[in-house]
Amino acid sequence: MDSHLSIDEVAKRTGLTAYTLRYYERIGLIAPVNRAAGGQRRYAASDLAWIEFLLRLRTTHMPIGKMQSFAKLRGAGDSTVPERRRMLEVHMQDVLAEIEAMQQAAASLQAKIEYYRSLEQSLASNPTTNGGHANEHRKPLRARARKTA
């Protein structure tokens, strides 16, 4: 990596906009970035590595407030290492619970997909059926809903 990147170069490498990078700096997610003589931001390799970690936290759905707390602890130095580790451990449990919930949802979707594949095969082999509906000429659900409302 170049020793110092412009905001546009960092934006291209991270997929963030220059506006987002400035916002992250303003709210304390990113420590103030070194500036060139003309005032342009110059990001070091360590800045880019931190931004990439923030993006991983964002991918795991860590709320921005927790990300800010983590960044503040990081900025306070090594004395906060145990607290940062505990914070990540708690977040990891949340991530694992979300993964488990998504796996259960995926299994449910897969079962429904298999059901519909089976139903399609059944319908294809017996074209006289009406898709499992007792009355093919029923009123649309919206019309029935108005009647009962």
Image (cartoon, rainbow, N blue to C red):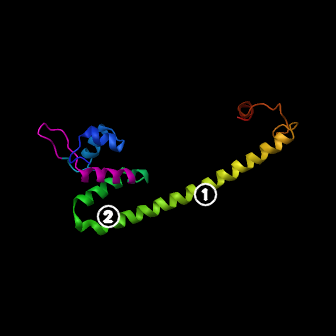
**Label 1's element?**
helix
Horizontal and vertical percent position of residue 134: 85, 39
One can see residue 139 in this view:
yes
One can see residue 20 in this view:
no
Task: Tell me where the magenta segment starts and ends, as one range.
Answer: 34-56
Q: Label 2, on which residue?
A: 84
Instruction: Name the outermost residue toward the left.
Output: 37
- Residue occupying image coordinates x 85% and y 42%: 125
Instruction: Name the outermost residue toward the front.
Output: 1
Real-space Cα separation, disc 2 to disc 1, in angstroms? 30 Å
- Residue occupying image coordinates x 83% and y 33%: 136
10 or 22, nearer to the observer: 10
User: Which quadrant of the figure contains the C terminus?
Assistant: top right
- Residue 46 is one of the magenta-drawn residues: yes
Horizontal and vertical percent position of residue 70: 31, 58
Horizontal and vertical percent position of residue 68: 31, 53
Apparent side of residue 91 relative to residue 77 in the rendered image (left or right) = right
- Residue occupying image coordinates x 77% and y 48%: 118
Q: Label 1, on which residue?
A: 104
Local crowd at mark 2 within 10 Å, few (<14), some, or many (≥20)?
A: some
Q: Amino acid at mark 2?
A: Arg
112, above or below 86, in the image: above
- Residue occupying image coordinates x 70% and y 49%: 112
Label located before the other in sequence (2 or 1): 2
**Label 2's element?**
helix
Q: Are marks 2 and 1 in contact (CB under 8 Å)?
A: no
141, above or below 96, in the image: above
Q: Amino acid at mark 1?
A: Gln
